[in-house]
Amino acid sequence: MASIDSSLEPILARYGRAPSALLQILRDAQEAFDWISPEVRSAVAHALDIPATQIDCLTQFYAHLYDEPCGRYRVLFSDNITDRMADAPALMARMLDQFGLEPGEVSSDGLLSIATTSCTGMCDQGPALLVNNRAVTRLTPERIDALCALIRARTPLDAWPSEFFEVNDNIRRADMLLGAACASGEAIRAALARGRDGMFAEMKKSNLRGRGGAGFTTAVKWEACRDAPGEARYVICNADEGEPGTFKDRVLLQSYAGRVFEGMAIAGYVTGAKKGFLYLRGEYSYLRAPLEAKLAEMRRENLLGDAICGDPGFSFDIEIHMGAGAYICGEETALIESLEGKAGKPRIRPPFPATHGYLGQPTVVNNVETLCKATEIAIQGGVFYAGQGTQQSTGTKILSVSGDCERPGLYEYPFGVSIAQVLEDCGAENAFAVQIGGAAGCCLAPHEFDRRIAFEDVPTAGAFMVFGQGRDMFETALNFANFFEHESCGFCTPCRVGTAVIARMMNKIDAGHGARYELNELNRLDVLLRTSSHCGLGQNATMALRDMMQKFAPAFERRLSLKDFEPGFDLDAALAEARALTGRDDAAAHLGADS
Amino acid sequence: MNAPFPPRAKKRLKIATATLGGCFGCHMSLLDMDERFLERAKLVDFDRSPLTDIKHCGPCDIGLIEGAVCNAENVHVLREFRAHCRTLVAVGACAINGGLPAQRNPLDLGGLMRKVYCDRVDETAQIPDDPELPLMLDKVYPIHEIVRIDYLIPGCPPSADALWKFLTDLIEGRTPRLDYAHFRFD
Ligand SMILES: Cc1cc2nc3c(=O)[nH]c(=O)nc-3n(C[C@H](O)[C@H](O)[C@H](O)COP(=O)(O)O)c2cc1C
Ligand code: SF4
Ligand code: SF4
Ligand code: FES
């Protein structure tokens, strides 16, 4: 107990023993102790004077918190479809084999466990895995063997070869944002020169729409926050980037962090917020230290802190909060719950965060890329900005291209670019299908490749996954079904039960026991989830499935049983135990197939 | 001029009902329809049902199943109904989810049987092995995991009003629809 207290004390002190920092405290405790043991659990509960069940709430909700020992090295293979297409399952099997483990099993010496995680945001350099929250990219059989040796030798992660952790930007096409050099402080100074109202007017003129998925007009959001009554205002940068197939925010935070933070400061300037949060997904933990360093540098340059750039009326600072493995925390109200130290379950909207957000106060939540866009508008003005892209989708959009193509990575285009153009540029002219917007997006077949990326046609937060000839789209649909079942937060019944039933039916079809009946049920569930789920996760969970059932029907049909219906399990085997108990083997002690 | 369609005799619908692993509560709810049930009975004929004592189901329009699938016999009855009923309806929580009988699912079947049949002092302790008795399945299953189901009526039991509404819809050719009040239980 003494050793727990001594290691826990600095963690508690770091967060001022605030119950609202519970998630951050547990994350750090997890790192220090490898798991949230009953002793750690009660010590934290005692120190924060909260019920221990509040801790259970978080350990059971967040995938990267463990209330059971999971080994000193916790290895999680990325299970996104692009990783799977790049042979991740075989690599995982290789590693399991070397240690003689089953997925999720902890080795008897407590050294390690190996399992899967939904997405690591490394689709352009996969297959990837996380080991104790650090991403290892570009896995090969050789790299797996090297990893196994390091783990066997109990080498601390800091002493692993740094190239294992190397994350490349892979910028393939740069435009307004990725291509423009921008001096530190340039955007903030430009905004200050325009004044609060002037900057807001430019935002309005730009017609900038959010890049996180929903495409809400940013100026309207900022205005609502600015004008809402409140004691304090907040700016939140949504860097949860959990959508499988998206990784552009990772690059922006790695190589354009100054612009992200300046964008947040500008949002603070316009809305009157003095405090900002960067909500960084746990999978991007490796970015935390450089981001903290960048913040410190900006404070030194007087670009953050009090009286920014000498303006006594402009104070703003930024704090980084870490996520802990929950896709739903990208949804803005779930994110705010998580930021307040709770399980990330979406709130009922309205009221919207712009008026009732963090701690019930007016709050702007914007995507990383959206905030970068605000810096462009500060420097170049709204009219110039609105001149790029299409009428309803101004400016440029960064696409995260992955899958079966020669050049995966980031492609920045003015809105309105055709799918075919992107495919040509990334070296995938012969594509079989493209999944746009991640698992929650739509699936396009070749006859639609002349469609365009824009809110008017194919909207997207940026994921662009390419499937080459010979790919089986059922596999993708199955992967997504398992993903949504895992990531549903469980708050509302249509999604909690619906995603589970869908996953079960898809797995039944995969096992060869599905029939038309299941396909009909899947279509019915699609309508049910779309129309009655509480938040965007459930509402969009079947979009890809619906597209794939329609456009790639043979992939489903060829797996169907010849029967009208069949159980998903062996009925005769279900009697085996009773046969053994009674010693019977007569005809009535067996169940044949339904005739 | 075309001759008018010859008038057709209105078809009398045939209904069958069965209880698998259930408590007859859902059937009680059917009887709870009281005089409405008699009125309904004028429009329909009953085939196999605990209400008629007919032992095997012939071709039917509607089959109502109460209870979960607990043993081999339940499977046979359910298959017989599926084979003969155009429309098969899961009635009540047991049929839909496994309900109360499925409470045994987390327990080990052997341990359960020994507890019931062997931990007794008064008789020769033995798990019955008579071939007349249906064997228990490893787990209790909802009926839709064994055969295709067309509709379900929620409740434990569904209220007489809910059953009345549902059957009236089915008989009159409307897609059955229960209003919130029909499945609000608190
Ligand atoms: C399930 C779900 C996941 C989401 N994940 C993200 C995310 O990772 N990053 C993001 O910026 N927005 C995400 N969003 C959208 C946010 O709720 C919100 O609309 C967005 O952050 C607003 O910023 P914007 O206006 O700049 O786009 C998600 C929404 C849902 C429903
Ligand atoms: S739709 Fe899914 S993720 Fe959203 S609140 Fe409901 S259960 Fe949670
Ligand atoms: S659903 Fe309820 S009333 Fe109907 S058989 Fe089951 S336990 Fe009895
Ligand atoms: S409120 Fe209880 S499950 Fe939705």
Image (cartoon, coloured by chain):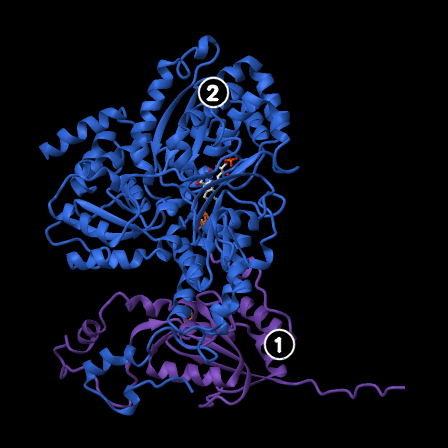
Question: Helix, strand or loop at disc 2?
Answer: loop
Ligand 3, by image quadrant, is: bottom left
Q: Can residue B49 be seen by looking at this rendering?
A: no
Residue B171 badge: 1
Question: In the image, which lettered chain appears purple?
Answer: B
Say which amino acid is labelled 1. Ile
Q: Position of residue A433 (x, y in %)?
A: 51, 58
Left or right: residue A112 compared with residue B52: left
| Subunit ID for the residue under disc 2 | A
Badge 2 is on which residue? Answer: A231
Residue at 36% in and 48% down? A119
In 3D space, how far apart are the residues under numbered discs 1 and 2 (Cα atoms)? Answer: 62 Å
Decide: is A81 above or below A459: below
Furthest residue in direction right, as rendered: B1
Question: Residue A436 versus residue A179: which sits nearer the camera?
Answer: A179
Decide: is A217 above or below A93: above
Q: Residues within 10 Å of mark 2 (few under 14, many from 20)?
A: few
Observer-side mark, 1 or 2, equals: 2
Q: Position of residue B22 (x, y in %)?
A: 39, 74
